[in-house]
């Protein structure tokens, strides 16, 4: 049993690092328990093989249902979590994303409107440094201008821009958490296209570059290879008193704390809550609603490629893209489908691995593949369409009968995309190919259905019977237990989730900081 702390945080990723920095800077003693390994920026290498080490290595998740959520692609393991390999595309959710039920009679409402979250978006973008052009981004909700000018647009982005213009569509610089110039002691990006490998220079806003250094400077402690398995409760079952965790030697530990923050990951947080069941909470902790693990969400994504006669030099730039389009954000604009969609344009593309040149055409091999790789090294172009999915109570995280090395049940996901998401994906695939051909590509094609981002499972709401946490990500059932991350989202939008989960986590952390006496007492 370790010495009692004010706050114990499970997970050192995007959400956990925000909580740690905010509360440590307020003078609270903070311990962050990370299930993965310790790492620094110096441990990162710009390599497709090393990039995998930022993803794989987390506890096994059984993916069932009609559609996978690509857990290993989306998850992370080690200091910085999944935000170590994210691409930094940081648009904002739109006002209608928070009021979908009220406005359209579809999906769910958030327990607040956009204007409540707006100042936290503004603060986060100032903290991390987002590059973009707020005026050119005509779809952007209200907010402070970006602190940095737009990132590089080379031949890759310019080629696609011609196709969008030919189709009467708009593009803007992509809103991205990559430094276009030096910012707060961090260097500008060198445009080498290795965002997937974690960015050892610190130009990409990952936790090791921004919030973890702040947390450590303020006295927070980080402890790696410490797998949290349960939240421990008092005898009355109404307050958290700490967490149970295991170290690689198989030893079980108890860490006492005044407050507990679960920021382990969208799938891991429900796993811990369900595994924390006891006589006072037989269906799992903070689960009086029966919704822990429910309303799991993902994005239906379509990769679109083209082979251009001119050199695109797509190996330069950022993995997240160079340009952006949200002309199809209107949730009722596509015939027969409800929901929003967007384009991220000009993705930096390397020869192989997950999003590489080779994997864009897995149907060819031998000399055909050799020629394709040769041509693609200079002439391929890539963009991705991201489509909203609808909340479905049957999409869920549950406990498996298989257990991990510490005796904790592994997580099982059950997922199926809605008919709306599949229709949006189909429309996006056809539109993307048409845009690419209009851009002058000699060949254009799209890949199969893929999954981006994982949200839901511990959704927020104003009614304790219909949600797990309140607007401050504080569990309805246990006042000193908070959830950090995209798991609190009731809707997915089509928007990349990392910016918004930073904002919701900052709002939550500041609420805990400002109401400490009432919450921790």
Image (tube, rainbow, N blue to C red):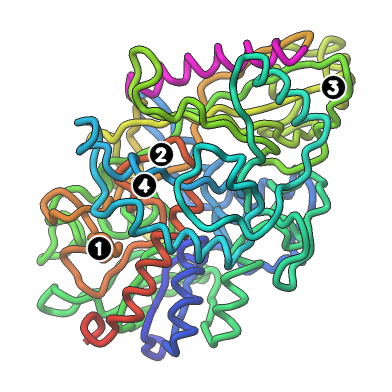
Residue 400 visible within the image: no
Q: What kind of element bears circle 4?
A: strand
Residue 515 is covered by the magenta coloring: no
Between discs 2 and 3, the one toward the N terminus: 2
C-alpha distance separating marks 2 and 1: 20 Å
Residue 243 location, x and y as percent?
Answer: 33, 74
C-alpha distance separating marks 4 and 1: 13 Å
Which quadrant of the figure has residue 101?
A: top left
Residue 421 is covered by the magenta coloring: yes
Please determine whether, in this image, residue 457 is positioned above or below residue 314. Answer: below
Q: Report the number of discs.
A: 4
Which residue is tagged 3? 379
Which residue is tagged 2? 62
Q: Which is more toward the observer, 431 or 445? A: 431
Mark 4 or 3, closer to the camera: 3
Residue 130 location, x and y as percent?
Answer: 62, 56
Q: What kind of element bears circle 2?
A: strand
Quadrant of the rendering where the N terminus is positioned? bottom left
In contact (CB < 8 Å): disc 4 and disc 2: yes
The range drawn in magenta is 418-440
Disc 2 crowd rating (10 Å Cα; few below 14, some 14-19, many 20+) is some
Q: Which mark is residue 411?
A: 4
Disc 3 crowd rating (10 Å Cα; few below 14, some 14-19, many 20+) is many
């Amino acid at each position: 049993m370790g010495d009692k702390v004010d706050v114990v945080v499970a997970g050192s990723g995007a959400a956990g690092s925000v909580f740690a920095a905010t509360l440590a800077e307020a003078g609270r003693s903070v311990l962050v328990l990370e299930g993965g390994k310790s790492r620094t920026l110096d441990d990162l290498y710009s390599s497709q093989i090393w990039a995998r080490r930022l993803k794989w290595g987390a506890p096994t998740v059984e993916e069932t249902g009609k559609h996978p959520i690509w857990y290993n692609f989306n998850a992370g393991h080690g200091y910085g979590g999944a935000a170590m390999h994210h691409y930094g595309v940081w648009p904002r959710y739109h006002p209608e994303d928070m009021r979908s039920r009220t406005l359209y009679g579809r999906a769910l409402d958030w327990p607040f409107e956009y204007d409540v979250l707006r100042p936290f978006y503004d603060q986060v973008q100032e903290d991390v440094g987002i590059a973009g052009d707020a005026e050119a981004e005509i779809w952007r909700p209200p907010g402070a201008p970006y602190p940095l000018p737009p990132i590089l647009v080379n031949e890759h982005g310019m080629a696609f821009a011609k196709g969008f213009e030919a189709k009467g569509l708009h593009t803007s610089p992509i809103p991205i958490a990559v430094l276009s110039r030096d910012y707060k002691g961090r260097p500008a990006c060198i445009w080498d296209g290795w965002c997937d490998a974690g960015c050892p220079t610190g130009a990409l806003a990952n936790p090791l570059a921004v919030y973890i250094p702040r947390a450590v400077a303020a006295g927070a402690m980080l402890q790696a290879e410490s797998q949290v398995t349960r939240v421990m409760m008092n005898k009355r079952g109404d307050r958290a008193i700490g967490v149970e965790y295991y170290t690689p030697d198989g030893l079980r530990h108890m860490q006492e704390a005044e407050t507990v923050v679960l920021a382990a990951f969208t799938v891991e947080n429900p796993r811990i809550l369900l595994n924390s069941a006891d006589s006072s909470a037989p269906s799992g902790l903070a689960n009086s609603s029966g919704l822990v693990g429910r309303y799991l969400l993902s994005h239906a994504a379509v990769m679109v490629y083209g082979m251009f006669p001119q050199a695109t030099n797509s190996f330069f730039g950022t993995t997240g893209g160079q340009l952006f389009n949200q002309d199809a954000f209107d949730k009722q604009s596509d015939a027969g489908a409800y929901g929003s969609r967007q384009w991220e344009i000009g993705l930096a593309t390397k020869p192989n691995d997950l999003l590489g040149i080779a994997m864009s055409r897995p149907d060819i091999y031998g000399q055909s593949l050799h020629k394709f790789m040769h041509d693609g090294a200079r002439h391929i172009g890539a963009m991705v369409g991201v489509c909203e999915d609808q909340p479905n109570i049957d999409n869920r995280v549950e406990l498996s009968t298989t257990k991990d090395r510490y005796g904790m049940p592994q997580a099982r996901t059950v997922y199926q995309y809605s008919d709306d998401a599949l229709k949006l994906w189909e429309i996006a695939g056809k539109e993307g190919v048409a845009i690419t051909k209009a851009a002058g590509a000699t060949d254009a094609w799209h890949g199969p259905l893929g999954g981006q981002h994982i949200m839901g499972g511990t959704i927020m709401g104003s009614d304790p019977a219909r949600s797990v946490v309140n607007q401050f990500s504080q569990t309805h059932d246990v006042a000193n237990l908070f959830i950090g991350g995209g798991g609190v989202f009731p809707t997915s939008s089509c928007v990349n989730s990392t910016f918004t989960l930073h904002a919701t986590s900052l709002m939550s952390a500041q609420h805990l900081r400002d109401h400490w006496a009432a919450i921790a007492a």
